[in-house]
Amino acid sequence: MEQSAISANEQPSPLNLAPPQRTHHSVWNFETVCFDVESKLFTVIKNDLLVPGSVFVDMFRVPSGDEPAEGKDENNPIVLHGTKANHFHVFLSVLYPWATGSVRLEEQNEGTLLGVLRLANMWHFPAVRDRAIPILTKSHIRTKDSPKKIRLGEKYYVQEWALDGYAAIVRMRGLKFGELEKSPYNFDDVVIKKILHLQVNYGPGPVHTNPNGYSSTCNGYQPEQGVVETAVKELLSDELARASLLPYWDSLHHRRQNTHRLHPSPGHEMERLDSEVTGAAPQQRKLHAIWDFETVHFQVEDEIFEVIKKDLLVPGSFFVDMFELPQQVEGNDPDHPIPLYEIQAAHFSALLTELSPWVPNAVRLEEQDEATCLGVLRLANRWLFPKVRGRAIHLLTSSTINGKDSVEKIRFGKDYQVRDWALQGYTEIIQKDEMEYGDLEKDPYNKLSDTEVKKILYLQARHGFAGHRRMKCRRPCKACAYSGFDVNAAVKELLLDEIAEP
């Protein structure tokens, strides 16, 4: 570990000096909130829950007072009564699709999809609702009978399902008198009269039976596409209003203004925990394997970075060993960050973008300048992030290094521990035309060590580059052909120990 790389103990702090004012980084500021769902603890990024109009916006606006803030940590989680852990897991997967272990909504069964839709309704997440409804409609609702469509439309506040159910009944052939009063319809007299009136005007027509017992249907009038639906919307507007979401959301908002709690939808009251009803000991809480977004705080220059701890735990990296040590208060909150000395905030931010590419508003490495890419490479070397190192080397090679002179390639290869850059520089010097005695001691070659110069001259002499350059050889001579000389292999063999790699 390089000196002053990570710990505050490695840097003496001046006495009697006020600490610099710290500011939260605009991107890397991942405050988390913890939920208890069926005794499973879900710790997620708070910001993604703050959808405008959602229950969480109102909830987190309430001052916590002197008591520990609910949801602050696993010791004070927000308990979601009556919510299934699997439904919450899938709901979070829609909000955090980048999370390792998240699942696709399209792959869920009907019960889970309806559970996610219920949570989206209850907590006012229109984007999640808009994702769930088309999947349910296509995969499950479309094949259900008309009464079921109406009931589900009313229960989950999806008017199109209820409308489709009513319109299908209006188009129904052979409806018997009194049938709409019985199961599965169970309509009241007002609804029955409205449906029969619509059948008179827009129905399929009567069924005629001839003396021989054969039936035929009158097809004299066929309403155009959408006409029945328009008529149903007009006459059954009161019934369709039962499936309207806006009044439900308005009522929830009014209730939240007074309580600031997470409310279920009508008819879906949250069950209280068994321990609260019977006095039994509560179930032991367990951390969810996926939704455990513990954060850690760093101070780089005068900025506080709050980042997801999981993303730093790359196997073999420095942080794996660091976080296995007994944890102190350092890093737990913005008031006790882990200071990172001799590091630029811009370089640390760019490194985090590679470790957490899902973060919105983060600038990718392709868009960074040379200095920032080199800074990321240095941090990847120091903290052992091989994938980030590989990405940085690839981008720098094509955008920067290939355009530098041979000595610069060697210097950058040594400074940033990239052997390919240095070996490319050595090879170019060895194969350079018309070099005179003493050239390697002049600028820019005078930056090379005596050992490097001797090795370069040795390779030039041993493999006859100078003679071939003077005779302007257009093709290999027998000596070169028989030698089977591979300049790249020779350079690696003799000069490889000049460049260390992490």
Image: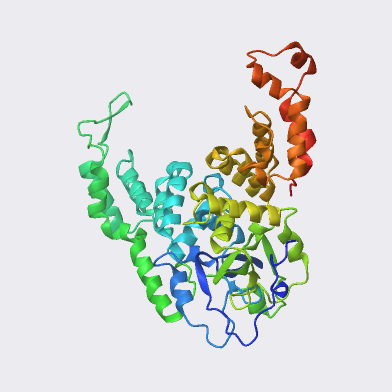
- Nearest the viewer among 113 and 201 is 113
- Nearest the viewer among 49 and 11 is 11
Q: Is residue 82 above or below residue 236?
A: below
Left or right of residue 328: residue 339: left
Left or right of residue 183: residue 454: right
Q: Quadrant of the N terminus?
A: bottom right
Can you name the residue that lies furthest to the top here? 478
Q: Position of residue 160 (x, y in %)?
A: 35, 50
Q: Position of residue 228 (x, y in %)?
A: 25, 44
Residue at figure coordinates x 75%, y 43% from the top left: 450
Q: Position of residue 85 (x, y in %)?
A: 61, 61
Q: Position of residue 148 (x, y in %)?
A: 44, 50
Residue 38: tell me if it is visible: no
- Nearest the viewer among 300 and 374 is 374
Q: Is residue 327 above or below residue 311?
A: below
Residue at figure coordinates x 73%, y 45% from the top left: 449
Task: Please identify the quarter of the rendering in which residue 144 is found.
Answer: top left
Residue 466: tell me if it is visible: yes
- Nearest the viewer among 101 and 351 is 351
Left or right of residue 120: residue 382: right
Residue at figure coordinates x 30%, y 56% from the top left: 191
